[in-house]
Amino acid sequence: MTINLGAGDRPLPLAGVTVLDLGQIYQGPYCGFLLAMAGARVIKVEPPTGEQSRRRGPGLPTAMLNTHKEAIAIDLKQPAGLEVMLGLVEHADVMLMNFLPGVPERLGLGYDVVHARNPGLVFAQASGFGVRNPDGELVTDPTAAMDITIQAASGAMTTTGYEDTPPLKAGVAYIDFLGGAHLYGAITTALFERERTGIGRSVEVSMADAAHFALTSPLAMWQATGHTVRPGNRQASGFAPYNVYPCSDGWIAIITVAPRHWPSLAEAMGRTELATDERFATPADRTRNVDALDAEIEAWTSKQSRDDVVQILRQAHVPAAAVRTVDEAVRDERQHARRSLQWVDDPDLGTVPLAYSPIRFHESPIYELDPPPAIGEHTDVILSDLLGMSPEQISALRSNGTVV
């Protein structure tokens, strides 16, 4: 793991914090990634066959979410493996996971057990629909929740797409990453409390709970009218123009929300008369006549290149962006200059773009991102460093399959 000190040499905020990351697929590993990028030592704990995302074979998601972590593989179903894990708990500050409710308890890693071994530990769980009820009892419906099932259950799929099409999920797994980001917030908040009290606590994040806030705009419409609509690329609550428009070589998103935006757009189009046209004079007028409004804008955009329209509207201070392909987005020179994206040579995937944490700590290092660790790549180092095990002891554990 290398560090670029060009951004400064002030230690990152979580330097010295040790995290046991038992996360799987997206939600848990993303939280662990954010903690690693904030300076924590993050140890990815997996079964001997690897966590679920590994079982699909090498892939960019695994590389993105597990860069800058160490890896140890432990068979937690063996008594010796559980004891190794509990030994690591004694030396950790955080243990995070996104198992089904009840799984940590069945493994012998419930909060009561680990808190007894390490009262200062922050025990963090992410789930689909919650881990504990307000009375402290475990949730009794351990429904396996994925991003799409939360999008369905939250109502989000009935607000996406167009009125005459079936329910539609978002094309990105935003619920998983909402859950992971909120778990990061819960962990860092609990670590702040521990600095004051010396005592850790159990925290949890439910993806279903986090999803409510992504529905703020549809909920506003529901509160006002008793129902929601599926506006496609338009805005459902009274802003127009607000859509995606064709250009001669692609598409552009144009948004007007401030009072000055519509007159500025009309002027940029060379159609200043539209700003005072009785069909478009007020936000309510534009919403009521949105089809005619969009037709006027499309007639302008469709005759020009996407990049030309972007440049014209940028100079007019009208919010707009080219609709880019994923290939275009990962080659964004500005993002690479910020180190928000970094090209990394991965032994399995070739040269791939890995994304940096959205959270920046000024005056502190920016890591050079690395390929993810192999399953159990750092088992010997971790057991030697944290538990003081000798090579012979580690070899004995490996010979009976307790660790890899």
Image (cartoon, helix red, strand yellow):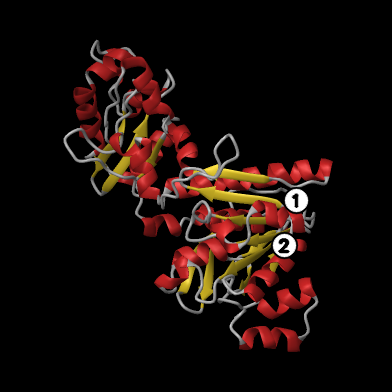
What amino acid does circle 1 point to? Pro
| Residue in view at x 27 percent, y 23 percent | 271
| Image position, residue 9 (x, y; %) | 79, 57
Q: Foreground: 283 or 224?
A: 224
| Image position, residue 262 (x, y; %) | 36, 22
| Residue in view at x 74 percent, y 56 percent | 93
Please say if 311 is above or below 224: below
Report which residue position mark 1 lands on: 13
| Residue in view at x 51 percent, y 75 percent | 346
Q: Residues within 10 Å of mark 2 (few under 14, many from 20)?
A: many
Q: Foreground: 75 or 279?
A: 75
| Image position, residue 97 (x, y; %) | 57, 56
- State the mark number for residue 209: none
Circles 2, 1 touching at the beta carbon (< 8 Å): no
Report which residue position mark 2 lands on: 89
Q: Which residue ends up furthest to the top in the rendered image?
A: 278
Which quadrant is home to the N terminus? bottom right
Please say if 231 is above or below 284: below
Q: Secondary structure at mark 2?
A: helix
Q: Secondary structure at mark 1?
A: loop
Which quadrant is home to the C terminus? bottom right
| Residue in view at x 51 percent, y 72 percent | 50
